[in-house]
Amino acid sequence: MAAGDRAVSPSARSAALRVFADARLTRSSLFAGLVAVGFANGISEKVYRSVADNGFATAIFNTFDISIILWGACFAALAMFSLASAEDGLRRGDGLVSLLAGLAFLAPVPALSWLGLSLIAVHLRRTASDDPTRRAAAIVFALTIPLFWARLAFAAFSGTILHIDARLVGWMIGTVPVANVVPLADGSGSLFIAPGCSSLANLSLVWVSAAVFVNLRSGRWTLPAIGWTAACAAAVIAINILRIGLIGFYPSQYDLLHGPVGASAAGWLTFAVIALISYHRVGFDAAR
Protein backbone atom coordinates (compact mmCIF):
# COMPACT_ATOMS: atom_id res chain seq x y z
CA MET A 1 0.00 0.00 0.00
CA ALA A 2 1.38 3.39 -0.97
CA ALA A 3 2.04 6.00 1.68
CA GLY A 4 -1.01 8.07 2.45
CA ASP A 5 -3.49 5.44 1.22
CA ARG A 6 -6.12 4.35 3.67
CA ALA A 7 -7.75 0.99 3.80
CA VAL A 8 -11.55 0.96 3.68
CA SER A 9 -12.95 -1.17 6.46
CA PRO A 10 -15.47 -3.92 5.62
CA SER A 11 -18.07 -2.20 7.80
CA ALA A 12 -17.72 1.05 5.82
CA ARG A 13 -18.03 -0.86 2.56
CA SER A 14 -21.17 -2.66 3.72
CA ALA A 15 -22.69 0.62 4.93
CA ALA A 16 -22.07 2.26 1.55
CA LEU A 17 -23.56 -0.71 -0.26
CA ARG A 18 -26.66 -0.56 1.94
CA VAL A 19 -27.12 3.10 1.05
CA PHE A 20 -27.01 2.33 -2.67
CA ALA A 21 -29.26 -0.67 -2.21
CA ASP A 22 -31.87 1.35 -0.32
CA ALA A 23 -31.82 4.19 -2.85
CA ARG A 24 -34.43 3.71 -5.59
CA LEU A 25 -36.11 5.78 -8.20
CA THR A 26 -39.58 6.86 -7.18
CA ARG A 27 -42.38 7.81 -9.54
CA SER A 28 -42.39 11.38 -8.27
CA SER A 29 -38.67 11.91 -8.83
CA LEU A 30 -38.78 10.31 -12.28
CA PHE A 31 -41.70 12.36 -13.56
CA ALA A 32 -40.58 15.55 -11.82
CA GLY A 33 -37.31 15.27 -13.73
CA LEU A 34 -39.14 14.62 -16.99
CA VAL A 35 -41.42 17.61 -16.43
CA ALA A 36 -38.44 19.88 -15.75
CA VAL A 37 -36.64 18.66 -18.89
CA GLY A 38 -39.78 18.91 -21.02
CA PHE A 39 -40.58 22.44 -19.86
CA ALA A 40 -37.00 23.59 -20.46
CA ASN A 41 -36.97 22.08 -23.94
CA GLY A 42 -40.40 23.46 -24.79
CA ILE A 43 -39.47 27.05 -23.97
CA SER A 44 -35.96 26.81 -25.43
CA GLU A 45 -36.89 28.40 -28.77
CA LYS A 46 -38.73 31.27 -27.09
CA VAL A 47 -35.84 31.87 -24.70
CA TYR A 48 -33.34 31.89 -27.57
CA ARG A 49 -35.38 34.40 -29.55
CA SER A 50 -35.84 36.64 -26.53
CA VAL A 51 -32.11 36.73 -25.82
CA ALA A 52 -31.19 37.17 -29.50
CA ASP A 53 -33.66 40.04 -30.00
CA ASN A 54 -33.26 41.91 -26.71
CA GLY A 55 -30.00 40.85 -25.08
CA PHE A 56 -29.57 38.67 -22.01
CA ALA A 57 -30.26 41.31 -19.36
CA THR A 58 -33.44 42.57 -21.01
CA ALA A 59 -34.58 39.03 -21.70
CA ILE A 60 -34.26 38.13 -18.02
CA PHE A 61 -36.16 41.29 -17.02
CA ASN A 62 -38.94 40.30 -19.43
CA THR A 63 -38.85 36.70 -18.11
CA PHE A 64 -37.86 35.58 -21.63
CA ASP A 65 -41.27 36.71 -22.95
CA ILE A 66 -42.88 33.92 -20.96
CA SER A 67 -45.58 34.86 -18.47
CA ILE A 68 -44.68 34.75 -14.79
CA ILE A 69 -47.83 32.68 -14.36
CA LEU A 70 -46.31 29.90 -16.48
CA TRP A 71 -43.02 29.96 -14.56
CA GLY A 72 -44.99 29.79 -11.33
CA ALA A 73 -47.10 26.89 -12.60
CA CYS A 74 -43.99 24.88 -13.44
CA PHE A 75 -42.48 25.44 -9.99
CA ALA A 76 -45.84 24.63 -8.36
CA ALA A 77 -46.01 21.31 -10.20
CA LEU A 78 -42.46 20.40 -9.15
CA ALA A 79 -43.31 21.37 -5.55
CA MET A 80 -46.33 19.05 -5.58
CA PHE A 81 -44.16 16.21 -6.88
CA SER A 82 -41.84 16.75 -3.90
CA LEU A 83 -44.79 16.11 -1.57
CA ALA A 84 -45.64 12.78 -3.18
CA SER A 85 -45.10 9.55 -1.29
CA ALA A 86 -41.52 8.30 -1.37
CA GLU A 87 -42.84 4.74 -1.11
CA ASP A 88 -44.60 4.94 -4.47
CA GLY A 89 -42.48 2.89 -6.84
CA LEU A 90 -42.63 2.62 -10.60
CA ARG A 91 -45.69 1.01 -12.13
CA ARG A 92 -46.66 -0.73 -15.32
CA GLY A 93 -46.81 1.77 -18.14
CA ASP A 94 -44.41 4.24 -16.54
CA GLY A 95 -41.52 3.04 -18.68
CA LEU A 96 -43.45 3.32 -21.95
CA VAL A 97 -44.80 6.78 -21.10
CA SER A 98 -41.34 7.95 -20.05
CA LEU A 99 -39.85 6.61 -23.30
CA LEU A 100 -42.47 8.31 -25.49
CA ALA A 101 -42.14 11.58 -23.60
CA GLY A 102 -38.35 11.40 -23.83
CA LEU A 103 -38.53 10.89 -27.59
CA ALA A 104 -40.79 13.94 -27.85
CA PHE A 105 -38.26 15.97 -25.84
CA LEU A 106 -35.40 14.81 -28.07
CA ALA A 107 -37.16 15.71 -31.32
CA PRO A 108 -35.86 18.90 -32.98
CA VAL A 109 -39.33 20.47 -32.65
CA PRO A 110 -39.75 22.18 -29.23
CA ALA A 111 -43.55 22.16 -29.56
CA LEU A 112 -43.55 18.35 -29.29
CA SER A 113 -42.39 18.76 -25.69
CA TRP A 114 -45.88 19.93 -24.77
CA LEU A 115 -47.34 16.76 -26.24
CA GLY A 116 -44.90 14.76 -24.12
CA LEU A 117 -45.91 16.69 -20.99
CA SER A 118 -49.60 16.22 -21.83
CA LEU A 119 -49.03 12.47 -22.08
CA ILE A 120 -47.29 12.45 -18.69
CA ALA A 121 -50.10 14.49 -17.10
CA VAL A 122 -52.88 12.24 -18.41
CA HIS A 123 -51.00 9.08 -17.42
CA LEU A 124 -50.34 10.28 -13.87
CA ARG A 125 -53.86 11.62 -13.44
CA ARG A 126 -55.24 8.17 -14.33
CA THR A 127 -52.80 6.04 -12.35
CA ALA A 128 -51.64 8.07 -9.33
CA SER A 129 -52.62 6.66 -5.95
CA ASP A 130 -51.59 9.68 -3.88
CA ASP A 131 -53.21 13.12 -3.93
CA PRO A 132 -50.07 15.28 -4.46
CA THR A 133 -49.17 13.40 -7.66
CA ARG A 134 -52.70 13.82 -9.02
CA ARG A 135 -52.59 17.54 -8.28
CA ALA A 136 -49.16 17.87 -9.88
CA ALA A 137 -50.49 16.13 -13.00
CA ALA A 138 -53.40 18.57 -13.21
CA ILE A 139 -51.02 21.55 -13.03
CA VAL A 140 -48.72 20.06 -15.67
CA PHE A 141 -51.61 19.60 -18.08
CA ALA A 142 -52.85 23.15 -17.40
CA LEU A 143 -49.33 24.37 -18.18
CA THR A 144 -49.55 22.92 -21.69
CA ILE A 145 -52.80 24.75 -22.53
CA PRO A 146 -51.42 28.24 -23.34
CA LEU A 147 -48.18 26.85 -24.73
CA PHE A 148 -49.70 24.29 -27.08
CA TRP A 149 -53.43 23.52 -26.99
CA ALA A 150 -54.61 27.15 -27.13
CA ARG A 151 -52.33 27.78 -30.09
CA LEU A 152 -53.68 24.67 -31.80
CA ALA A 153 -57.24 25.84 -31.18
CA PHE A 154 -56.40 29.30 -32.50
CA ALA A 155 -54.88 27.83 -35.66
CA ALA A 156 -58.10 25.90 -36.25
CA PHE A 157 -60.59 28.62 -35.33
CA SER A 158 -58.66 31.88 -35.73
CA GLY A 159 -61.30 33.45 -37.98
CA THR A 160 -64.10 32.87 -35.48
CA ILE A 161 -62.03 33.97 -32.48
CA LEU A 162 -60.83 37.19 -34.11
CA HIS A 163 -64.36 37.93 -35.32
CA ILE A 164 -65.65 37.69 -31.75
CA ASP A 165 -62.95 40.11 -30.58
CA ALA A 166 -63.83 42.46 -33.43
CA ARG A 167 -67.53 42.35 -32.56
CA LEU A 168 -66.79 43.25 -28.95
CA VAL A 169 -64.54 46.14 -29.99
CA GLY A 170 -67.12 47.35 -32.50
CA TRP A 171 -69.83 47.21 -29.84
CA MET A 172 -67.65 49.32 -27.56
CA ILE A 173 -66.82 52.07 -30.06
CA GLY A 174 -70.14 51.97 -31.90
CA THR A 175 -69.12 50.67 -35.33
CA VAL A 176 -69.93 47.54 -37.31
CA PRO A 177 -66.92 45.28 -38.00
CA VAL A 178 -66.37 43.13 -41.07
CA ALA A 179 -64.61 39.90 -40.08
CA ASN A 180 -61.68 41.13 -37.94
CA VAL A 181 -61.62 44.68 -39.38
CA VAL A 182 -63.23 47.35 -37.19
CA PRO A 183 -63.99 50.85 -38.55
CA LEU A 184 -62.62 53.63 -36.33
CA ALA A 185 -65.06 55.70 -34.31
CA ASP A 186 -64.27 58.90 -36.26
CA GLY A 187 -64.54 57.17 -39.63
CA SER A 188 -60.95 58.01 -40.57
CA GLY A 189 -59.95 54.43 -41.22
CA SER A 190 -60.17 50.88 -39.90
CA LEU A 191 -58.55 48.83 -37.20
CA PHE A 192 -57.24 45.39 -38.12
CA ILE A 193 -57.24 42.95 -35.17
CA ALA A 194 -54.21 40.71 -35.60
CA PRO A 195 -53.78 37.28 -33.95
CA GLY A 196 -51.41 38.78 -31.37
CA CYS A 197 -54.23 41.04 -30.15
CA SER A 198 -56.66 38.21 -29.48
CA SER A 199 -58.00 37.64 -25.97
CA LEU A 200 -57.43 33.88 -26.22
CA ALA A 201 -53.82 33.91 -24.99
CA ASN A 202 -54.70 35.67 -21.75
CA LEU A 203 -57.78 33.50 -21.27
CA SER A 204 -55.55 30.42 -21.22
CA LEU A 205 -53.45 32.07 -18.51
CA VAL A 206 -56.61 32.44 -16.41
CA TRP A 207 -57.11 28.69 -16.57
CA VAL A 208 -53.49 27.97 -15.65
CA SER A 209 -53.56 30.30 -12.65
CA ALA A 210 -56.87 28.92 -11.40
CA ALA A 211 -55.64 25.34 -11.78
CA VAL A 212 -52.49 26.15 -9.80
CA PHE A 213 -54.29 27.68 -6.82
CA VAL A 214 -57.04 25.06 -6.76
CA ASN A 215 -54.53 22.21 -6.77
CA LEU A 216 -52.17 23.87 -4.30
CA ARG A 217 -54.97 24.25 -1.77
CA SER A 218 -57.44 21.39 -2.13
CA GLY A 219 -57.51 19.89 -5.60
CA ARG A 220 -61.31 20.24 -5.72
CA TRP A 221 -63.18 22.47 -8.16
CA THR A 222 -66.19 23.93 -6.36
CA LEU A 223 -68.99 25.92 -7.98
CA PRO A 224 -67.76 29.21 -6.41
CA ALA A 225 -64.24 28.51 -7.68
CA ILE A 226 -65.58 27.89 -11.20
CA GLY A 227 -67.66 31.06 -10.96
CA TRP A 228 -64.71 33.19 -9.92
CA THR A 229 -62.61 31.68 -12.71
CA ALA A 230 -65.30 32.73 -15.19
CA ALA A 231 -65.38 36.22 -13.64
CA CYS A 232 -61.60 36.44 -13.97
CA ALA A 233 -61.85 35.44 -17.63
CA ALA A 234 -64.45 38.14 -18.23
CA ALA A 235 -62.22 40.75 -16.58
CA VAL A 236 -59.25 39.72 -18.73
CA ILE A 237 -61.33 39.98 -21.90
CA ALA A 238 -62.56 43.41 -20.79
CA ILE A 239 -58.99 44.67 -20.32
CA ASN A 240 -57.97 43.55 -23.81
CA ILE A 241 -61.11 44.92 -25.47
CA LEU A 242 -60.75 48.22 -23.59
CA ARG A 243 -57.19 48.68 -24.84
CA ILE A 244 -58.15 47.97 -28.45
CA GLY A 245 -61.28 50.11 -28.10
CA LEU A 246 -59.22 53.07 -26.90
CA ILE A 247 -57.19 52.78 -30.10
CA GLY A 248 -60.48 52.88 -32.01
CA PHE A 249 -61.52 56.04 -30.17
CA TYR A 250 -58.11 57.73 -30.29
CA PRO A 251 -56.22 56.50 -33.37
CA SER A 252 -53.75 59.38 -33.00
CA GLN A 253 -52.50 57.67 -29.80
CA TYR A 254 -51.85 54.39 -31.55
CA ASP A 255 -48.12 54.34 -30.82
CA LEU A 256 -48.75 54.94 -27.12
CA LEU A 257 -51.61 52.46 -26.68
CA HIS A 258 -50.27 49.73 -28.94
CA GLY A 259 -46.56 50.28 -28.30
CA PRO A 260 -44.36 49.14 -25.40
CA VAL A 261 -46.04 51.46 -22.88
CA GLY A 262 -49.56 50.31 -23.66
CA ALA A 263 -48.52 46.68 -23.93
CA SER A 264 -46.69 46.77 -20.59
CA ALA A 265 -49.56 48.52 -18.82
CA ALA A 266 -52.12 46.05 -20.18
CA GLY A 267 -49.85 43.09 -19.42
CA TRP A 268 -49.22 44.05 -15.80
CA LEU A 269 -52.89 44.92 -15.22
CA THR A 270 -53.91 41.55 -16.66
CA PHE A 271 -51.37 39.73 -14.48
CA ALA A 272 -52.56 41.60 -11.36
CA VAL A 273 -56.22 40.76 -12.02
CA ILE A 274 -55.48 37.08 -12.68
CA ALA A 275 -53.19 36.72 -9.65
CA LEU A 276 -55.45 38.55 -7.20
CA ILE A 277 -58.68 36.81 -8.18
CA SER A 278 -57.01 33.40 -8.36
CA TYR A 279 -55.30 33.79 -4.98
CA HIS A 280 -58.03 35.49 -2.99
CA ARG A 281 -61.16 33.94 -4.54
CA VAL A 282 -60.57 30.87 -6.73
CA GLY A 283 -58.12 29.12 -4.41
CA PHE A 284 -59.96 30.28 -1.29
CA ASP A 285 -63.31 28.94 -2.45
CA ALA A 286 -61.69 25.69 -3.60
CA ALA A 287 -60.12 25.23 -0.15
CA ARG A 288 -63.36 26.07 1.64
Image (cartoon, rainbow, N blue to C red):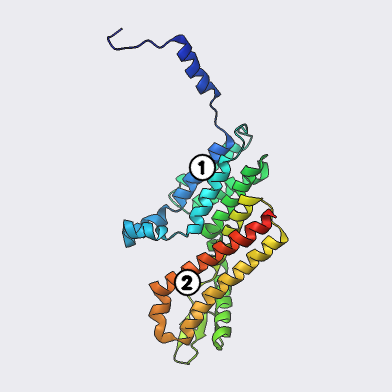
The reply to whether residue 207 is visible in this rendering is: no
Q: For label 2, count other residues whose C-alpha is less than 10 Å away and answer few (under 14), some (14-19) or many (20+).
A: some
At numbered mark 1, what does the secondary structure look like: helix, strand or loop? Answer: helix
Q: Which amino acid, by three-letter code, is at mark 2?
A: Ala
Within-10-Å neighbours for mark 1: few <14, some 14–19, many 20+: some
- Residue 189 location in percent, x, y? 45, 89
Residue 97 occupies which quadrant of the picture?
top right
Q: Quadrant of the C terminus?
A: bottom right
What's the mark number on residue 71? Answer: none
Determine whether, in the image, residue 152 is placed left or right of residue 188.
right
- Whether residue 89 sits left or right of residue 183 in the image: it is right
The quadrant of the image that shows the N terminus is top left
Real-space CA distance between mark 2 and mark 1, rounded to the nearest whole angstrom: 34 Å
Q: Residue at x 59, y 40 (%)?
A: 83
What residue lies at 52% left-to-right and 19% top-to-bottom?
A: 18
Image point (56%, 76%), residue name: 165
Residue 103: x and y, percent? 49, 43
The foreground one among 15 and 41 is: 15
| Mark positioned earlier in the residue sequence (2 or 1) | 1
Query: Dot 2 lies on which element?
Result: helix
Check if mark 2's residue and mark 1's residue have beta carbons within 8 Å: no
Quadrant of the rendered image containing residue 22: top right
Coordinates of residue 74 in the picture (x, y in percent): 51, 50
| Residue sitting at x 70%, y 62% | 224
Q: Would you say residue 169 is visible in this rendering?
A: yes
- Given the image, on which type of amino acid does mark 1 rest? Leu
In the image, residue 231 sits, relative to residue 87, either above or below, namely below
Q: Which residue is mark 2?
A: 266
Front position among marks 2 and 1: 2
| Position in image of residue 280 (x %, y %) | 61, 61
Q: Which residue is mark 1?
A: 34
